[in-house]
Structure formats: C-alpha cells, structure tokens
Image: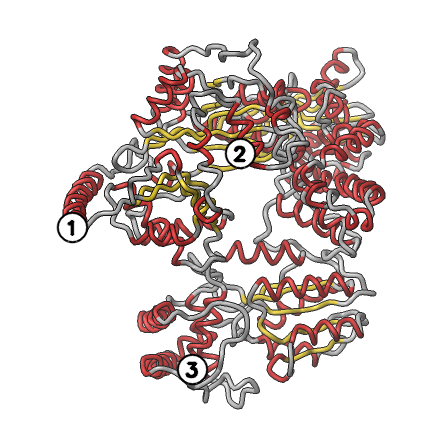
Amino acid sequence: MQDEFNHYLTKNRVNISMELVTAVLGDHGQRPKDDYAVVTAVTELGHGKPKFYSTPEVIAFCRKWRLPTNHVWLFSTRESAFSFFAAYDALCEEGTATPVCKALDEVADISVPGSKDHAIVQGEILEGLVARMVSRESSVQMEEVLRNFSQTPLDGVDCDLGPTLREICAPDRLDEMQKIKAILENVGSSMYPDHFDWSGNDGLDAQSRKAGESVVAEFLQAHPTDYATKKLQETIRLMKQMKPSFFPAAFKCYGNYQKVDSLSNDKYYKMVIHVHDDSVFKRYRQEMKKNQGLWPLYRGFFIDVNLFKANNKKAAELSKESNILLNSIEGSLDSSSSAKDGLADEDSNLMIKLKFLPYKIRTFLIRNGLSAIFKDNRSDYSNYYVRKMESWGTSESKLKELCILLNKWATYIRGKYDDESLSSSIYLTVENLERKYLSEAEPFLEQYAKSSPANLALVRAADDMVQTEKFLAILDAQRDEDDDFQPECGAVPSCRTASLDVVSKTEGLIVFFPGIPGCAKSALCNEILKMPGGLGDNRPLHSLEGDRTKGKYWQKVAAEQKNKSFRIILADKNAPNKDVWQQIEDMCRTTNAAAVPIIPDSEGTDTNPFSLEALAVFMFRVLKRVNHPGNLGKDSPNAGNVLLKFYKLYDGKIRREFENELYERFGSLVKMPLLKPDRAPLPGDVKSILDEGLGLSSLHGVKRGRGKPSNGSDVSEEWKQWEERLREILFGYEDYLKSIQVPFDVALKEVVEQLKAVAKGDIKTPDTAKQRFGNIIFAAVKLSQADILGLLRKVAEKDTDVSNFLNGIKLENNLNKVHITLAHKGAHGVAAVASYAVYQNQEVPVSFNALFYNDKMAALEAQLGIVNGETIVSRNDWPHCTIWTAAGVGPKKANTLPQLVSEGKAKRVPIGPPITISGVLDFY
C-alpha cells in the first residue's frame, strides 16, 4: 500500500502536512506517553493556485489511506458557534483533554473523534484548539464523508514495528546525521530506497551539500515554466525586498540528490522557507490588499527547485511557450475568482488559536522563563511571568495563585542549579535545561499539588497522579456562585518582586516618549517641572533634554538614574524603537526603577501607529519652531524629510500592537490627547503631499534603523521641491491644523493626572490592554438594584408583615449582586452554561410572582421571558433571585425555600398581578 500511496502523491502533486508529537525534540506542555503524528493539512498543487483540502476532504483522504487525524468538531449553527466560544471561555484556565472533549462533544453539531485518543497517547495536558471558518456546505459534506468512510484501525497497531523514535534518537547518538539516517533506515525501503537520495555522496563538500542565498537569488532571476513557480517567485521576491526585521524568515536550500544527473548541467535543490514571527502574516495581508494576485503566505514551505540550463534559442522558445501558458492560466483563474459559497478568501484563511492555561503554565511560564530565573536580577522572572499573564487576560484569582506557585518554582530550580554549576558545565546549560525541563518541573508540580486541594486544581497534574473526575470534583467543591459573581475585574495583584505596576516611593521612575518630533514632549516636560509639588509625592523631578545633552543620551540617563535612584527622570528625547525600549528596561532592572511611556493618542493607519493627520500636525509644529536647540525647526531645509524618517521607524505595527507591546514591556501607558474626535477630515492637498513624501522615502531607500536621522542640508533637488511645497501647503491650511488639535492645557491636565496615578501606584489598565475574560463559572440574568427595590416597595405596601421584615434587614448590602442563575458549571456542566452564549448581553424580561422568606433568607420567584422568539429557560429547578441572606448563610441555601414553605418554616407571599422587570444575560 505504501508504494501505491507514494505513486498517488507524486502523480497528483499532493502535499501532506503532519505534526509530530514527540519527546525527542525537547519538552513542551507535557511529555507525551507515546510518539505519534497527525495530519493537519492536505494540499494539491495542480497547475494553478494550490487547493487546500476542506476539513471533510481531509477526513476522507486520511480514512481512505489510513492516516492519523485529530479530533474535529463542526459548529454549523449560530447557537453552536456561540456555545463553542463560551465553552472555551469556561475552560480556558483549567481545560484538560477529557473535560474539553466532553464539553465540545455536547455543544458541537458534528463530532469526529481522532484516530488517536489525546488522553491515551499524549496525556491530559491539552495545548489548545484551532478554530477555522468553513463554508456553509461543510456539515452536509462531513455527514456524507462519515457515511462513506468509516474509521478503520490503523495498520500495525499490535505489530512489532522495530525500535521506537526514542530508542533511535537515544542520548548516545549525539550526531544529528546519525539520527536522521537511523530514522530513515527504520521506515522501510518505500520511503528510503537509497541513502544517496537523502544525504548525497559523503564525499561532497559542505558547500554543495547546503546551498546559500545565491540559490534564492538565482531562483528569483530564472524564468518560470509554470504558474506555481511564478506565484512562488512573487511571494519570495516580496519577502526578500522587505527589511528583514519586517519579514523575519529563513531561506535554506539543499541539494536534491534524488534528481542529480552527472551528465546534466541542471541544478536541483530542496528549498525550505520558515516564517519566524506571527507579525509577518499581518504585514503580508496588507500587501495582499494592494496586490490581489499574491498567493497567501504560510508558516513553512518545502519546495523542489529545478533550475534548467538552456541555450539562447531554446530559452526564447521556452519563455514564449510558458508566457502563453501563464497568461491562459491567469485568465481562467480571474474568470472563476468569485467567492465560493459566499465565503471570501480572507475568511477562508481565518484561523484562531485557543490555548489552555495548564499548558501555558508549563511551556510559557516555566520553560520559557528559565532564562529570566537565572539572570542576576531576581525580579526579572516575576516581571516576565506577570506580563505574560496580563497579556493573556488571566483572571485576577488565577494570577494570584500562579504568582505563589511560580515564585516557589524559581526558588526551587535556582536552589538546585546555581549560576556556577550552569556556567561550569558544557552539558548543563539553560538551553539544555529548557529542552528537558519537565524532568524537573513535573516532580516539583506533583509535590506542589499534594500540598492542598486548591493547588491540585491549579496544577492539573499531567501524570496519572489524579484522575480528571477528581479535578472537577475539587473545583466544584470550591465554588460558590455568589463568590464568583464578579463581572468587573479589579486591579491586577502586585505579584512581582519589583513590580512595574505599583511604583514604590523608594524607587525611581523614568518617563519617556515613543513619539515623533513635534509631539510636544519638551513643552510637556517644561510644564511638569514648573508644577508645585511635582507629581504628588516627595520624589524630586529631573529633566534631561536630548537636544542639549552631548554624548550617548540613554547612557547618560542610566548614569543619572544610578547616581540618584530616588527621583523621577523626564527623558526628553524621542524613543522610537525596540533598541531604546530594551535599554530602558535594562535601566529599570539595574536601578530598581520603573518606567512609563507617554505616547500621542492617534488612531494610526494599516501599517503605522500614527495617522497621517498626526504626522501633519507634528510637521506643522516643527516648521513653526524658532531657534530650536536641535536645529530642527523653521530654518531647517529638510525638516519634513527628517520627520518622515522618524515616521518610518514605526512602520510595520498597527496601533493596537504598538500600544500592547509598550504596555506589556512597562506595565503602564500614558496617552496624551492630540486630535479632537469631532474634527474635519484631512484635506486632499495635505494627504497628497504626505503620500508623495512617503513615496519619495521608499524610492530613495530611506534607511530605517538605529540612530537619529541626519539634519544635514545635502538634499536632492527633488527633495528640495517637495520641502517647499510641504511648507506652502501646511501653512495654507494653518487654520485647519490648529483647529483639529486638542488644546495644550487640556492635554497637559490629562497627562499629569495619568502620571500622578502611575507615581502613586494607582495604575489603570489602558483601553488597549487585552480584556480579562477570566474563567466563566455560570450564566445569569443580572438585575438592577433600583428595579428590585421598587418591586419590593410595591409588595410591602400591600403586606404589613413583608414591610416589617424588609425594614428589619439590611437589604441594600445584598442587592449589589442580585441575579437569576441560569446554569452553573459545577452543577450543570460546561455545555449547559455555554448554551446561553447566543443570548449574551441581551435584555431578558423577568416576571416575579411571589416572595419567599424566613429569618435567614429571602428570594423572589421568577419566570423568565422570551428573547428573539425563544423562551429563556433556567437549568435550576426553581428559578429565583436571592435578595438577602443572614450572616453565615450562603446564597445557595435560598434554593431550599420552596421546601421550607411546604414544611411551614418559611412564608410565600404572592405578587398579583406579577411584576415584570428586565435584566441583562451575561457570563460570570
């Protein structure tokens, strides 16, 4: 069957992408119990645009050829799709394989089990889920596939297949080529008929075995003989033309020895392209909007490159023939490029990764934090893990628990491996420790879990120490819905040893400006220095102006901060890139200071955190300067060019990315108001002159890098003409440019208020910070205190006993959390809670028809109304809202009131006619 399969792949130009789950390549998440692989994608190259198989087609293909697949769930209705995301929110901070699969099985419209059970081959620690947009027909196609292709056992399950991957890659095999050869020799002759096909002649020199950048250059210059080659050249050419920091990717080429012919001058290579950073995809999508013909970019490419030699006559013939073929293909593709099934290409490529906290604890907080643990400054690690959890939106309760766990982990691992032992051994390095960190982490986590049920629930042990059912029981026992009713998250706990979120009065503070000349930083610093009492504490203020400071500015700031750490430094200089931000972070570590960035508030563009309106205002301000100490003002012949260079330094980041990165690095962010929200749009002339300048910058290859752009007067004639027209246009629109700016005194007041909050430690998360979704516990209809008080007054007016009862209790203290529980995760399950997602944030009418009370508690009997034609039904046997409980009585006890009434231990007062008020359905 293997030979038949190989022939099929070659004939149909099919590529199979698989994920290898193994302990051989280093630890992450949980060391799998067995090494295995699963198919993640199947692609047909064909003779046009690559066709990626739909999920039903992947399942059919894998079942036909007996290939392993992952578990797949299909959500084909609005209700099930909403429920899926709610289920993830309910499990994101505690999800492991068994409860996640169980919940998704319950909310999905179709569930297709994987050929390998994650809990059996991998274990309970689950990395996450991938959600993908699919066409409307997917459910019909999937049902047909499941009818036609049954799940068959994989061949060889009970057979002796030779040594395992772990045995092949045993520690004594230190040479990588030895490992590769041993693996290939064990897969059989169908895949490995000849050692030369994979490794070439051992006598070949290193240069011929591994080709370099020259092959990529030669490939880009060659004439394509088919459509796929042409489109691939377009993608690679774009990536190579961009600045490496914009498109970080690796291009490697190796000799393709399977096609080597000693009698031919043709060249055969295997090209590997690996995109290193997720940000590349966002930038590439922006390019795709400009060039609709670009093919999508993927994380990795494995390509056979055949470079054919031809004489001039033959080359001309091939070129003519291939051009005709390419034009024909492009024409046919253009004519059939309409969106299929109403799903646009951009939507069909949309995928979302949803990871679970138990995995992230082990991989991102423990493994990836090892280098920070072994740094000189002990606060590096706590700063690292708090920022990580903040960026994830981790709930406050979980963040507090994990701070304790991770501090103990750092103490444990540092105690076992001190700096001297790590530096003195060539085998024991931080890198090697990261590869096999689970050998240390799992025993530590196991001991930590045994110390209390709460720790056990937090750690979610990866081994068989505790069963999943026991985990869920522990969690359920800990939860009380009233304790969980906290829809608004409070401030982040101060877990770091030297927290950047809470600035101690014994520490320094560095205020800096990731901005552009003309952003009013110097004016701001001067006004702050004049303020009596400074920023409201007893720390002195000191400003260091960049234009008047000789030498390396940021080294001067570091020296100033080190000499007098107990003060606030205003770093009056633009800090436009990551190199500067890293220097500031280093200052904070070495001097125990905190830092806060001040940025002009601007919407930004698709590729830059600052809008063209902001750029126009900055340029206008600079061109109005007189006697500027840095010679960047009215008399500077190339002031516009200089500002364009600064503007370009920020290219490649949208506004939210820019603000998020600053917040994650420094724990706080101050925004300086710049433009009025009700302003008129940017005039066409102003936009045109700015666009022209940006075009000139790209045309003349403006260097985007470190250092301050030169203020010299060596400007080309083209630039001179542009500078003259820039001044003419901006000054012509002077009234407009003044009218759209927020008055300086207003901006100053807002910035000072924010800075005082930073200095006091009362830092609020900026709007840009990722929302804290927490961990959904239950669904409820929240009611307003005023509505419930009004209802009770009406009841009390008709019943003296009720009036006396209400007057004798402190009702207002209980009504700030009044709600009707619809479903609770502990009592009803994740799927039950998630089923209300389709109604989230909608108003629900609620009719109250009776008051139940005794000397320990009181509740209103409720009947839920209709939303979007559907009656909202509570999973509780008795829908109600608890309005009061005596000291020491939990809100859950109110569920017993109907029984107590039947026993004569409580009263029921009918409300006639029933009173209807509205509440909002949400998760808590």
Residue 316 circle label: 1
Q: Amino acid at mark 1?
A: Ala
Give me the C-alpha separation between circle 2 and circle 3: 55 Å
Quadrant position of residue 852: top right
- Label 2: few (<14), some (14–19) or many (≥20) C-alpha neighbours in 10 Å: some
Quarter of the image that includes the C terminus: top right
Of tags 1 and 3, which is closer to the observer? 1
Q: Nearer the viewer, residue 540 or 261?
A: 261
* Above or below 467: residue 132: below
Q: CA distance from mark 2 to mark 1?
A: 65 Å
Whether residue 912 is visible here, answered yes or no, is no
Residue drawn at x 42%, y 56% as measured from the top left: 606
Q: Residue at x 78, y 39 (%)?
A: 405
Q: Nearer the viewer, mark 2 or mark 1?
A: 1
Q: In the structure shown, which secondary structural element does the residue marked by tag 2 occupy? A: loop
**Residue assigned mark 2:** 840
Residue that carries the numbered disc 3 in the rendered image:
638
Closer to us: 804 or 324: 324
User: Image point 55% across, 84% down: which residue?
Assistant: 630
Q: CA distance from mark 1 to mark 3?
A: 49 Å
Q: Position of residue 559 (x, y in %)?
A: 74, 74
Can residue 149 be seen at all in this image of the molecule? yes
Classify mark 1: helix, strand or loop: helix
Q: Are marks 1 and 3 in contact (CB under 8 Å)?
A: no
Rendered position, 663 above or below 809: below
Local SS, label 3? loop
In the picture, measured across the screen, residue 351 lies left or right of residue 772, that is left
